[in-house]
Amino acid sequence: MAVLAIAVVVNQFRTAHLEREHSIQMQTEHYVKAVEAHVTYSIQSVDLSLIGFANAIKVMPAKQSRSPETMTELLSSRESSFNSDYWITFIDPKGNAVAASIGNSVIGASYADRDYFKVHVNNDAHGKLFIGAPSIGRVSKKRLFFLSRRVENAKGEFMGVVAAPLNVDRYVRVFENSRLDSDVSIALIHAGGKVIARVPNFEKAFARDMRATPLFDNVSKAPSGSFKSVSVIDNLSRIFSYRVINGLPLIVVVGNNDAETTRLLQQNYLVGGAGLAMLLLLMLGAGHFFLRTYRRQEEREHRYRALYSASHDMERQLRANEESMKQASLLFQNSGEGMMVTDAQGLILTVNPAFSMLSGYAEKELIGRHAQTLASSRNDQEFFDRLVEGVNETGHWKGEIWHRNKDEEELLVAMVINTVYDEQGKPFRYVALMSDITQKKASEEIIWRQANFDTLTGLPNRRMFHEHLRKEMKKTDRSQLPMALVFVDLDYFKEINDTLGHDKGDLLLKEVATRLLSCVRSTDTVARLGGDEFTVIIGELRNPGDVMRTAQEILQQMSRPFQLGDNIAHISGSIGITLYPEDGADAETLIKNADQAMYTAKQQGRNRFNYFAPFMQESTHARINLVNDLRQAVSHNQLRLMYQPIIDLTSGAIVKAEALVRWQHPLRGLLSPADFITVAESSGMMIGIGDWVFQQAARQARQWQAIASPAFQICVNKSASQFRDDSSNYQQWLDFLHELQLKPKSIVVEVTDKLLLDVANSNIGLGHEHMQICLDDFGTGCALTFLKRFRVDYIKINPADGLLICEAMIAMAHKLNIKVIAEGIETPQQLSALTASGCDFGQGYLLSKPILAEELQEKLQKQVEPVNK
Ligand SMILES: Nc1nc2c(ncn2[C@@H]2O[C@H](COP(=O)(O)OP(=O)(O)OP(=O)(O)O)[C@@H](O)[C@H]2O)c(=O)[nH]1
């Protein structure tokens, strides 16, 4: 480049005689480019130091960046890269110099009034290099101009200014050495107007305002150009070329005196070849100087380029970092999650607003506090030891911690801690993210409790019971110690509900839970499966006899009276026991078998316990089959009604019939109620069967009333469970009679005295004003008062109970205006004795066994024929 420039200059000189002024102009134009290059690179070189220093502060931990010692250290570590032409001063946000690369002389001096300081405080340079106007150094008294940059910390806060005062003498020296001849002028002028350096006449020119000169007229029109003018500094007429340095507030100007050039050129013409040679020599001399300058310049250029591009990369990187920092900062400020940053010792450096919300403390109250002081004492030392161990080993930790907020409330917080390491790999910062999960945890806890525990008794529910059972079975597999499953079902618990109310029933269930717990070890499980069904799991039995003792203890506890508010209740329980692994290899079988053993205990009379035995399983199978078959009985038309005639013992006429249900089983033949009613009741099918019987009987009654007499009645049996499970179907029955246009009296409902007691307790009422009531099996426990209370129409007696008793009952019933039906009459003696005692009606094998409807119909028809005749 330099050689080329020289060649051009030489060439220009060779043609100068043709275009004299033009060639001078060309010369100054090239000249000014060279000067511009020099100034540019020198400025960039200094700026590199400023950038490096500003960036070093930016990435520095805040505490260090506030320390003058660290700053001085940093500057002196970079001293080798400085030369005497400039130094670097770090000025704090108040404008005071706190550190400098040239020692302590400037420390403490105030630069608050400097243009560059003001610019950076207001961030008017927008992060760019600022070059201030030239002035005399406050301390050094040298002629200076200032390169400066704003320093910010990672958060973008103003940390101060780094300023590099450049000694103007340096440029004066270089410009002087670069002059082609004494009339050439070279100047560096601040865009603000003031002269920074100028040769010749530097002293006179320094800081002179050039705004009112032709130079600035031209600069305002174009960033580079040439003009002819008389210098205001030395009054010489010159051709000037100027360039505004790209991106910097600096103008370089080179001027040449045309008179001198003309003279030289004329001389050359005069002296011919010798003169030209002289000129060439002169030029080459200057060229040589230029060449040297250019070479150095080129070297520098390379160096600067390398440095500058490295710095640019760094800048770009920093800018990218800045961008992500900005985003991180946005996130930090606006995150819903609490964030806290501590130093390596755990002292809080910063927290975000969400953290302040969570803890109730403002950021400034937290800075400097140890993070652990915010934790509740509910976290024990062992917890912290584990936390620290986790962080030390892996760099992070995740878990739940109890936090105590400013109001001393304890919050459960989900926390993640991450470590930031320094260049040496040592922990430098800890960043903790936190969110309050107290509420969430509490509702989870509630949901979990609801899912796993019985709300009434607080005992584990069916779900939890299954879980415990599986666990205990696994324990047994390991320890080889058997485990027992105890099934407890309360006896006639429904009666407690019915007689005392559901609330008292609840109280009893709660008390049962407490008593069951008192019978077992704390390691055993007591659960409520639902209703009045409880289970006990007795794990790892060293002594199998313990199970029996526990079962006895439970029965004993159940037999104690229960105080339910003002009421006292008595109850018992039936217990079934299975042992693992003997009675079942899996949970399902164990439970099923325990249930079976309990069922057997119920069948055997309740208030007892039963170990499971395989025979129970067989009867279970039979029972299950029967239940399945029975389900189809109604829909498959397998039920039949037989009718046993009831005779008026005075007239001998059939006046009523008792409807009796039979089941025509496809394989087992005709089954009587004794074979299936219990199953029908326990499997909930009794209502359906009962309804079916009633409807059949009602239809039959209508038919036979038409044949025999409008007073003809059919008796239907109503089972206890029909009342227990559904008291509302009574009305449906009445409605049905109404539909058939039958009087309610057409049907007599036979109930047992046990049922009458239930009904009395539950106040269901039998609707005695409509259908008639016959009390079956009278005498097995019914109080006479009930007969009156329920306006019983008939009682049934059985001569098998003894004829004398029957006689007494008949007399008593008649006193109460109740009619008597004797059932089970098998001998003529019984018949005559009952007739003699005044018994009203009779039925039994002697008179007629239960017969098909058609058969009875025939009998009825025969019975009415003679009367009609
Ligand atoms: N008070 C109350 N009663 C309940 C609750 N859950 C179920 N029951 C009643 O408990 C009774 C359980 O009756 P069962 O076990 O079938 O019959 P039982 O009367 O105990 O007769 P057996 O078991 O045959 O001795 C039913 O009447 C249910 O309505 C409850 O949470 N509170």
Image (spheres, grey):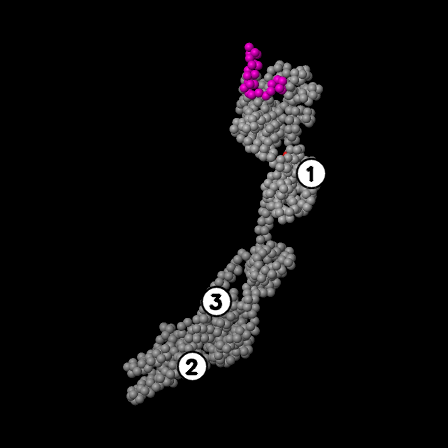
Q: Quadrant of ligand 1?
A: top right
Asked if residue 810 lies left or right of residue 290, the reply is: right
Q: Which mark is residue 318?
A: 3
Q: Residues within 10 Å of mark 3 (few under 14, many from 20)?
A: some
Residue matched to label 1: 555
Q: CA distance from mark 3 to mark 1?
A: 81 Å
Q: Secondary structure at mark 2?
A: helix
Q: Quadrant of the N terminus?
A: bottom left
Position of 320 relative to 107 (above/below) = above
> Picture coordinates of residue 90 (x, y %)?
52, 73
Amino acid at circle 1:
Leu
**Start-end of magenta stretch:** 843-869
Asked if residue 801 lies left or right of residue 342, the reply is: right
Q: Residue at x 56, y 14 (%)?
A: 862
Front position among marks 3 and 1? 1
Residue matched to label 2: 174
Front residue of 645 and 250: 645
Q: Earlier in the sequence, mark 3 or mark 1?
A: 3
Query: Looking at the image, do the residues carrying marks 1 and 2 touch, with CB atoms under 8 Å apart?
Result: no
